[in-house]
Amino acid sequence: MANKYFSGEKAPREEAISKLMQHVAGLFDGRFLARITSDDGGPHVTLYLEVENPNLPIEPFLRDALHNPKWMGWRFIIAKCPPGYVDGVLLSKKKSDY
């Protein structure tokens, strides 16, 4: 059943990411990054939010503004991560020296 819910028209990848980044910029003051990722359920939009304590729920205002399983036709996931994760892990360059 989940596949039927997430099937259908999807916005182009670049447009979905760009619009989500603009939307979140008006709601969230911290560091964040949106990108297309994939898991066993296929490709989806993941929004990484840097928060002080990833174990705590996100603020109710932000949760209500972002709580939706779809974004422009894409399956949508929010991942909370600690400060520094976006730049230190997600945007870091791979070292081929290892």
Image: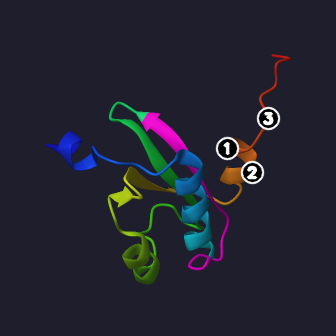
Q: Position of residue 33 (x, y in %)?
A: 63, 56
Percent x, y of residue 65: 42, 77
Which residue carries the number 3 mark? Answer: 93
The residue pinned by badge 1 equals 90
Residue on which disc 2 sits? 87
Could you tell me the amino acid type at mark 1?
A: Leu
Colour treatment of the image: rainbow
Range drawn in magenta = 26-38
Q: Amino acid at mark 2?
A: Asp
Disc 2/disc 3 C-alpha distance (Å): 10 Å
Q: Is residue 75 left or right of residue 3?
A: right
Label 2 sits on a secondary structure element that is helix
Report the side of 58 relative to 19 (left or right): left
- The residue drawn where x is 44% and y is 68% is 56
Badge 1 crowding class, 10 Å Cα cut-off, few under 14, some 14 to 19, many 20 or more, is few
Q: Is residue 94 left or right of residue 97?
A: left
Q: Is residue 50 visible?
A: no
